[in-house]
Amino acid sequence: MNYYDTFITVSPDSKATVGLVPQEKKNGPSKHGIEYELLAGSPYAYTQEELLFEVHIRHKGIPPEELEARGEQLWNEFFQRSHACLRASMLPKKYGWGIHFDKEGKIALYGVESPEYKKLAENDGGGLKILAGMRSSRST
Protein backbone atom coordinates (compact mmCIF):
# COMPACT_ATOMS: atom_id res chain seq x y z
CA MET A 1 0.00 0.00 0.00
CA ASN A 2 2.98 2.33 0.37
CA TYR A 3 4.52 4.47 -2.36
CA TYR A 4 8.28 4.80 -2.90
CA ASP A 5 10.19 7.55 -4.74
CA THR A 6 6.86 9.15 -5.63
CA PHE A 7 5.46 12.67 -5.62
CA ILE A 8 1.72 13.30 -5.50
CA THR A 9 0.99 16.71 -6.94
CA VAL A 10 -1.94 18.91 -6.05
CA SER A 11 -5.11 17.76 -7.81
CA PRO A 12 -5.65 19.28 -11.25
CA ASP A 13 -8.97 20.82 -10.16
CA SER A 14 -7.69 22.21 -6.85
CA LYS A 15 -8.15 25.95 -6.40
CA ALA A 16 -5.38 26.19 -3.78
CA THR A 17 -2.44 28.42 -4.70
CA VAL A 18 -0.63 27.87 -1.38
CA GLY A 19 -0.54 25.06 1.16
CA LEU A 20 -3.34 25.73 3.64
CA VAL A 21 -3.69 24.38 7.17
CA PRO A 22 -7.01 22.48 7.45
CA GLN A 23 -9.42 24.03 9.93
CA GLU A 24 -10.72 21.97 12.85
CA LYS A 25 -14.36 20.99 12.92
CA LYS A 26 -16.60 21.99 15.83
CA ASN A 27 -16.37 18.52 17.36
CA GLY A 28 -12.58 18.16 16.98
CA PRO A 29 -10.00 17.59 14.28
CA SER A 30 -10.93 16.08 10.94
CA LYS A 31 -9.04 13.17 9.42
CA HIS A 32 -7.25 15.48 6.96
CA GLY A 33 -6.47 17.84 9.84
CA ILE A 34 -4.83 14.98 11.71
CA GLU A 35 -2.94 13.95 8.53
CA TYR A 36 -1.63 17.49 8.22
CA GLU A 37 -0.66 17.74 11.89
CA LEU A 38 1.29 14.47 11.80
CA LEU A 39 3.07 15.11 8.50
CA ALA A 40 3.86 18.77 9.11
CA GLY A 41 5.12 18.01 12.60
CA SER A 42 7.23 15.00 11.63
CA PRO A 43 8.34 15.01 7.98
CA TYR A 44 9.61 11.67 6.71
CA ALA A 45 8.57 9.88 9.91
CA TYR A 46 5.57 7.89 8.60
CA THR A 47 4.87 5.50 5.74
CA GLN A 48 1.40 5.67 4.24
CA GLU A 49 0.25 2.62 6.25
CA GLU A 50 1.65 4.03 9.48
CA LEU A 51 0.03 7.39 8.82
CA LEU A 52 -3.39 5.94 7.99
CA PHE A 53 -3.32 3.82 11.15
CA GLU A 54 -2.19 6.71 13.38
CA VAL A 55 -4.91 8.96 11.92
CA HIS A 56 -7.46 6.22 12.65
CA ILE A 57 -6.24 5.84 16.25
CA ARG A 58 -6.38 9.58 16.90
CA HIS A 59 -9.66 10.18 15.09
CA LYS A 60 -11.39 7.35 17.01
CA GLY A 61 -9.79 8.44 20.28
CA ILE A 62 -8.39 4.99 21.06
CA PRO A 63 -6.65 5.32 24.45
CA PRO A 64 -2.92 4.50 24.77
CA GLU A 65 -3.67 1.63 27.19
CA GLU A 66 -5.87 -0.09 24.60
CA LEU A 67 -3.30 0.52 21.89
CA GLU A 68 -0.58 -0.98 24.07
CA ALA A 69 -2.69 -4.01 24.94
CA ARG A 70 -4.21 -4.65 21.50
CA GLY A 71 -2.00 -2.74 19.06
CA GLU A 72 -1.22 -5.59 16.68
CA GLN A 73 -4.83 -6.76 16.72
CA LEU A 74 -6.08 -3.21 16.02
CA TRP A 75 -3.56 -2.89 13.16
CA ASN A 76 -4.71 -6.18 11.62
CA GLU A 77 -8.40 -5.30 12.02
CA PHE A 78 -7.83 -1.87 10.46
CA PHE A 79 -6.05 -3.26 7.41
CA GLN A 80 -8.57 -6.05 6.81
CA ARG A 81 -10.62 -3.33 5.09
CA SER A 82 -9.35 -1.43 2.09
CA HIS A 83 -8.42 2.23 2.53
CA ALA A 84 -8.02 5.09 0.09
CA CYS A 85 -4.45 6.09 -0.65
CA LEU A 86 -3.16 9.60 -0.04
CA ARG A 87 -3.95 10.60 -3.65
CA ALA A 88 -7.56 10.80 -2.39
CA SER A 89 -6.64 12.88 0.68
CA MET A 90 -8.04 16.38 1.00
CA LEU A 91 -4.45 17.64 1.42
CA PRO A 92 -3.69 17.50 -2.34
CA LYS A 93 -7.34 17.77 -3.41
CA LYS A 94 -8.31 20.92 -1.52
CA TYR A 95 -5.54 22.28 0.70
CA GLY A 96 -2.65 22.70 -1.76
CA TRP A 97 -0.18 20.14 -0.43
CA GLY A 98 2.07 17.92 -2.52
CA ILE A 99 3.02 14.64 -0.87
CA HIS A 100 6.53 13.27 -1.30
CA PHE A 101 7.43 9.64 -0.57
CA ASP A 102 11.16 8.99 -0.27
CA LYS A 103 12.96 5.78 -1.22
CA GLU A 104 11.91 4.22 2.12
CA GLY A 105 8.26 5.22 1.64
CA LYS A 106 8.40 7.94 4.32
CA ILE A 107 6.22 10.99 3.71
CA ALA A 108 6.63 14.78 3.77
CA LEU A 109 4.35 17.64 2.70
CA TYR A 110 5.28 20.55 0.41
CA GLY A 111 3.04 23.54 -0.24
CA VAL A 112 2.24 24.11 -3.90
CA GLU A 113 3.86 27.56 -3.68
CA SER A 114 7.21 26.28 -2.36
CA PRO A 115 10.43 25.92 -4.36
CA GLU A 116 10.70 22.33 -3.07
CA TYR A 117 7.28 21.51 -4.54
CA LYS A 118 8.28 22.94 -7.91
CA LYS A 119 11.56 21.02 -7.90
CA LEU A 120 9.83 17.74 -7.03
CA ALA A 121 7.03 18.28 -9.57
CA GLU A 122 9.52 19.04 -12.36
CA ASN A 123 11.37 15.79 -11.56
CA ASP A 124 14.56 16.96 -13.27
CA GLY A 125 16.54 13.87 -12.28
CA GLY A 126 13.76 11.58 -13.48
CA GLY A 127 14.00 9.48 -10.32
CA LEU A 128 10.47 10.13 -9.08
CA LYS A 129 7.15 8.73 -10.15
CA ILE A 130 4.76 11.71 -10.46
CA LEU A 131 1.07 11.16 -9.73
CA ALA A 132 -1.65 13.78 -9.53
CA GLY A 133 -3.94 13.97 -6.53
CA MET A 134 -7.41 12.74 -7.38
CA ARG A 135 -9.91 15.21 -8.69
CA SER A 136 -12.72 16.37 -6.46
CA SER A 137 -15.25 16.00 -9.25
CA ARG A 138 -15.52 13.82 -12.33
CA SER A 139 -16.59 16.60 -14.67
CA THR A 140 -13.25 18.39 -15.20
Image (cartoon, grey):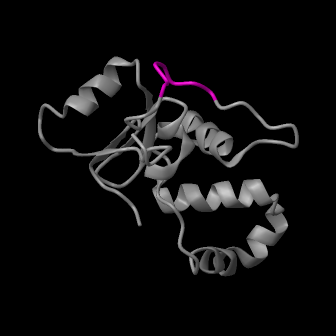
Q: Which residues are magenta?
A: 15-21
Q: Mainly helix, strand or loop, the magenta region?
A: loop
Q: Position of residue 101 (x, y in %)?
A: 36, 47
Q: Position of residue 100 (x, y in %)?
A: 37, 41
Image quadrant where one finds the C terminus: top left
Q: Position of residue 49 (x, y in %)?
A: 50, 62
Quadrant in the rendering for residue 20:
top right
Residue 17 sits inside the magenta stretch: yes
The residue positioned 74% from the left and 78% from the top of the image is 70
The answer to which of 128 and 87 lies nearer the viewer is 87
Q: Is residue 8 left or right of residue 52?
A: left
The answer to which of 92 and 129 lies nearer the viewer is 92
Taking the view exactly as shown, the residue that stands out farthest to the front is: 139
The residue positioned 60% from the left and 80% from the top of the image is 76
Q: Is residue 120 left or right of residue 134?
A: left
Residue 47 drawn above or below residue 41: below
